[in-house]
Image: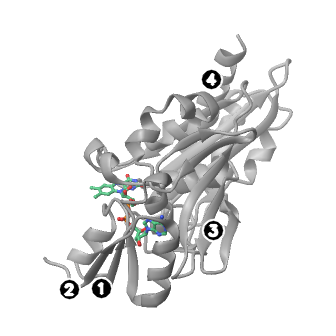
Amino acid sequence: MKPAPFEYVAVSSVNEAVTVLQRYGTNSRIIAGGQSLLQEMNLRQTRPSFLVDINGIKDLDYIRETTNGLVIGALTRHRTVERSEIVRKICPLVQEAVKHIAHFQVRNRGTIGGSLSHNAPGAEYGVVTRLLDAEIVVVGPDGERIIPAEEFFVSHFKTDLKPNEMITEVRFPALPKETGYAFLEVTRRHGHIPIVSTAATLMLNPDDTVKEARIALGNVSNNGVPYKVKAVSRLYGQKITPDVLADLAKEIEAEVNPDPHADSEAAYIKQHSGITGRRVSEISSATYRKQVS
Ligand code: FAD
C-alpha cells in the first residue's frame, strides 16, 4: 500500500515545528523515526495532509546527566540509548527496557519521543516511564508543559499531547545505586510488540526483607495505559521466598484487567502478568544483592 497524498516540510527548530503544527492544525503530524507513522500511513489508517519532519532539529538528540537523574532529548534513537554509558550509569533499567524494542534496524531509527507519542500498549518506554515516574516535557504555542508519566498516557494510542504540541525531552529520576531492577517481556517472536511487558525495581533491608519495590506492566489494562501494580506493597517487610512470590503472582493476576480486544486472550495476558511479575521481583532481588556485595 502507498500513503494518501500529503505535503511535507522539514524544520530545524522546535519553534519552527510548533509554528507549522499550529498553522496546519489537526491535519498535520510530526514525523520522527517514521517506524510507526509510515506503517499507519501506508495502511491508510492515518491520512495526515501535512508531515512535519523534525529530524533536522539536531539539539533534540542528546542524553545528559543532571543533578536529579537523566534527561533524554525527544529525537534520541533507541539504539543510542541502548549503547549509552550515561544511561547505564544513571538509570540502567531504561537500557534494559530499550534492548527489547523491535530489531536493531527499527532501533536505529525509532525515537523516544515517537515511541511515547505513539503509546502502543505494551511499549517498553511506556512501562519504564510509568514505573520510574518520569516526566515528559512538551512544547506548544503557549510554551512548555511538564507532564508526569502518570498523566501523559490517556488511552490506547492516545496521550495528553495536544495536536500543536511536541515532546522535546524525557526526564528520568536517577535510580539509587543500590537498587535491584529487571525488565522482562512475553512476545510471540523476538522483536514483536510484547503481549506483556514488565519492569521492576527493588531494595532490601539489611535483614533481606523488602524495603521498597515497584512493578509496572504494559498491555494489561483495558484503558490501554501502562499499569503500576498495587499488590507489590504486600512484599514490604517480607523476604523474597518462593511462597511469597507465588502469592504475589496470584494477586497480580487478579489485579490486572486486560483489554478484551487485545491481540491475545485476556486470561493468557493475566496469567503472564503474574508469571513475569514474579520473575522480575526475583531478578530484581538478585541484582540488588549483586549491587551491595
Ligand atoms: P514516528 O513513527 O515518526 O511517529 C510515531 C508517532 O509519534 C506519530 O504520531 C508522530 O506524529 C508522533 N511523534 C513523533 N515524534 C514526536 C515528538 N517529538 N513529539 C510529538 N509527537 C511525535 N515499539 C516498541 O515500543 N516495542 C516494540 O517491540 C516495537 N516493535 C516494532 C517492530 C517493528 C517491525 C516496527 C516497524 C516498529 C516497532 N516498534 C516497537 C515501534 C518503534 O519503537 C517506533 O520507533 C516508535 O513507536 C515510534 O518512534 P518513531 O520515532 O519511529 O516515531
- The amino acid beneath tag 3 is Phe
Mark 3 — residue? 152
Q: Estimate the spatial distance between the alpha carbons at disc 3 and disc 2, rounded to whole Å.
A: 30 Å
Direction left: furthest residue: 1
**x and y percent of residue 114 in the render?**
44, 62
The label shown at residue 47 is: 1
- The amino acid beneath tag 4 is Thr
Mark 2 — residue? 4
Question: How many residues crowd mark 3 within 10 Å: few (<14), some (14–19), many (20+)?
Answer: many
Q: Estimate the spatial distance between the alpha carbons at disc 1 and disc 3, rounded to whole Å.
A: 24 Å
- Marks 2/1 in contact by CB < 8 Å: the verdict is yes
Residue found at x 66% / y 74%: 143
Question: How many residues crowd mark 2 within 10 Å: few (<14), some (14–19), many (20+)?
Answer: some
- Choose between 58 and 158: the one closer to the eye: 58
- Marks 4/2 in contact by CB < 8 Å: the verdict is no
In the rendered structure, the answer to whether residue 223 lies left or right of residue 36 reads right
Mark 4 — residue? 287
Question: How many residues crowd mark 1 within 10 Å: few (<14), some (14–19), many (20+)?
Answer: some
- Residue 153 sits in which quadrant? bottom right
Q: Estimate the spatial distance between the alpha carbons at disc 4 and disc 1, rounded to whole Å.
A: 46 Å
Marks counted in the figure total 4
- Marks 3/2 in contact by CB < 8 Å: the verdict is no
Q: Estimate the spatial distance between the alpha carbons at disc 2 and disc 1, rounded to whole Å.
A: 6 Å
- Choose between 191 and 171: the one closer to the eye: 171
| Quadrant of ligand 1 in image | bottom left
